[in-house]
């Protein structure tokens, strides 16, 4: 198969209703995307899997759902107001803005013998010197300004009266809602260390980069866990490894992603966020190279200590056995749902040259529709009625769709391209012997199944 490009995935996603450009009728909004009918189902399936596997199934995990707007001091305490920045340069002619590190990466990729350097380890001044030395230009071929640290927190205001409005931020990570509720969770539930709090929710970053589809957007959904522990009782390195194993298992086994497309990358001292003592990224091989999918960081007691200092709240834990009072440490696995989404689309994409078709080979549990029901002909009421009965039989059990347009070959082609694992056809034999044809997406094999056994057959095949 030829190398998959981001354009191919973007075009399929739009054509089949997975992802649309936001506000397309007004010319779009940079780095912003809406999810169509199929994308919405896929997103929901990913979130359900994450919640089920990492929160509901674990006795040591609880969930939370906190606000997008938090008290602005939260972001002062967390360090985001001071250090949540990207290196920004501006094209001196068009005034378009770019990330300096990305311009350098793009320049390096074009060199036959590139200098050996790790862009993630460069600070703003080093990037500026490098851009000047190598006369790196913007994608439009113009000189750029010296890089500046640009804070990517989104600001907005609370209050109706001009002058009395107060500045707040759209959250840049969901994690802070967890830290600021630490005391409430302790006091209102039966948790004891070690335990984790997880949540899924929207985060916002004033990203400079454009053109990476849903990989990097202004608004995105995060699924984050803060796993609290006593560093004197729990070896943080062993716990860190345990979380790495869980992350890998979720991606490779629960989501069914090919292991050869995954790898770990350790952050260097320079690259690590201000709050972290150790960070690893689980990278996926996207069409534009191996890039961060899911990060895990040892945030120590940094955040709780910062909130204690700024709020005066008692964000400590008292061990019920020893009576020792201390500030717990935390390990944080943090993933973007939209990156999981893009990874799943890319990994599922398959051009079946032998059969002249494009297939999204989703794991059946993730497929937007598990089955599609067809009456062989739409102008034969007896076939349509029987097919409707089959649809109604299936619909309460899993997501199914109805299709009566065009010939059966075209319907298969369409369902393959949206990743529907099974197509069920009601034909004239069905009226005689109560059996339907079940066609398998990946092999195109067909089985004849009695409608009385259809639900248990699908249950076994779908493994749901
Ligand atoms: N609380 C830690 C934190 O937010 P991060 O590495 O900045 O760490 C965690 O973000 C995850 O969120 C990333 O691994 C990525 O999957 C996702 N993410 C971050 N910025 C994103 C963006 N602009 N668009 C889409 N996903 C993003």
Image (cartoon, rainbow, N blue to C red):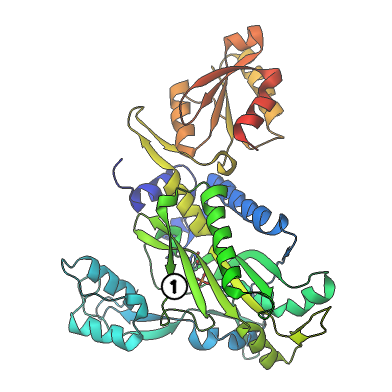
Question: Horizontally, is 1 left or right of 42 in the view?
Answer: left
* Whole-percent x, y for residue 378 in the image: 56, 19
* Whole-percent x, y for residue 237 in the image: 56, 73
At horizontal 71% and vertical 71% (from top left) the residue drawn is 194
| Circle 1 residue | 207
* Whole-percent x, y for residue 103 in the image: 28, 73
**Residue 315, placed above or below residue 61:** below
Say whether residue 247 is visible: yes
* Whole-percent x, y for residue 427 in the image: 57, 14
**Residue 158, placed above or below residue 36:** below
Question: Horizontally, is 79 left or right of 28 in the view?
Answer: right
Front residue (pair 239, 457): 239
Which quarter of the picture shows residue 98? bottom left
Say whether residue 97 is visible: no
**Residue 463, placed above or below residue 142:** above
Question: Horizontally, is 309 left or right of 14 in the view?
Answer: right
At horizontal 58% and vertical 32% (from top left) the residue drawn is 371
At horizontal 50% and vertical 26% (from top left) the residue drawn is 405
Residue furthest to the left: 112
Front residue (pair 48, 32): 48
Image quarter where the N terminus lies is: top left
Residue furthest to the top: 432
Front residue (pair 322, 194): 322
Which quarter of the picture shows residue 275? bottom right
Front residue (pair 141, 371): 371
**Residue 426, placed above or below residue 255:** above
Cβ of mark 1 under 8 A from ligand 1: yes
Q: Secondary structure at mark 1?
A: loop
Badge 1 density bin: few <14, some 14–19, many ≥20, Cα 10 Å: many
């Amino acid at each position: 198969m030829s190398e998959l490009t981001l354009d191919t995935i973007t075009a399929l996603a739009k054509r089949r209703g997975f992802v649309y450009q936001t506000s397309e009728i007004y010319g779009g909004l940079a780095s912003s995307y809406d999810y169509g009918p199929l994308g919405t189902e896929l997103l929901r399936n990913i979130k359900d899997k994450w919640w089920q596997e990492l929160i509901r199934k674990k006795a040591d995990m609880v969930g939370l759902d906190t606000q997008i707007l938090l008290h602005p001091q939260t972001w002062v305490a967390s360090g985001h107001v001071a250090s949540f920045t990207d290196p920004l340069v501006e094209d001196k002619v068009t005034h378009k803005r770019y990330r300096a590190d990305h311009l350098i990466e793009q320049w390096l990729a074009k060199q036959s013998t590139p200098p050996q350097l790790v862009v993630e380890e460069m600070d703003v001044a080093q990037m500026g010197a490098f851009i000047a030395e190598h006369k790196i230009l913007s994608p439009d071929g113009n000189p750029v300004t010296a890089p500046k640290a640009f804070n990517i927190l989104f600001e907005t205001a609370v209050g109706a009266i001009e002058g009395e409005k107060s500045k707040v931020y759209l959250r840049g990570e969901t994690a802070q809602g967890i830290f600021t509720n630490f005391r409430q969770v302790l006091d209102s539930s039966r948790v004891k260390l070690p335990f984790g709090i997880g949540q899924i929710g929207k985060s916002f970053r004033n990203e400079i980069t454009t053109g990476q589809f849903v990989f990097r957007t202004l608004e995105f959904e995060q699924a984050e866990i803060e796993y609290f522990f006593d560093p004197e009782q729990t070896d943080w390195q062993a716990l860190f490894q345990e979380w790495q194993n869980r992350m890998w298992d979720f991606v490779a086994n629960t989501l069914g992603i090919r292991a050869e497309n995954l790898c770990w990358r350790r952050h260097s001292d320079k690259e690590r966020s201000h709050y972290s003592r150790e960070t690893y990224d689980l990278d996926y091989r996207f069409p534009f190279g191996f890039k961060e999918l899911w990060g895990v960081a040892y945030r120590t007691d940094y955040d709780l200590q910062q909130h204690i200092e700024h709020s005066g709240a008692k964000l400590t834990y008292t061990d019920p056995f020893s009576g020792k009072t201390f500030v717990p440490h935390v390990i944080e696995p943090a993933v973007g749902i939209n990156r999981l989404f893009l990874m799943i689309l890319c990994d599922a994409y398959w051009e079946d040259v032998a059969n002249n078709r494009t297939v999204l080979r989703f794991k059946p549990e993730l497929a937007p529709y598990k089955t599609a029901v067809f009456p062989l002909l739409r102008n034969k009421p007896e076939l349509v009625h029987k097919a409707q009965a089959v649809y109604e039989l299936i619909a309460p059990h899993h997501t199914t769709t109805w299709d009566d347009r065009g010939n059966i070959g075209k319907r298969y082609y369409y369902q393959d391209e949206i990743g529907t694992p099974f197509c069920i056809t009601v034909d004239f034999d069905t009226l005689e012997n109560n059996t339907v044809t079940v066609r398998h997406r990946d092999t195109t094999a067909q089985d004849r199944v009695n409608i009385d056994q259809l639900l248990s057959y699908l249950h076994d095949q779908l493994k749901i």
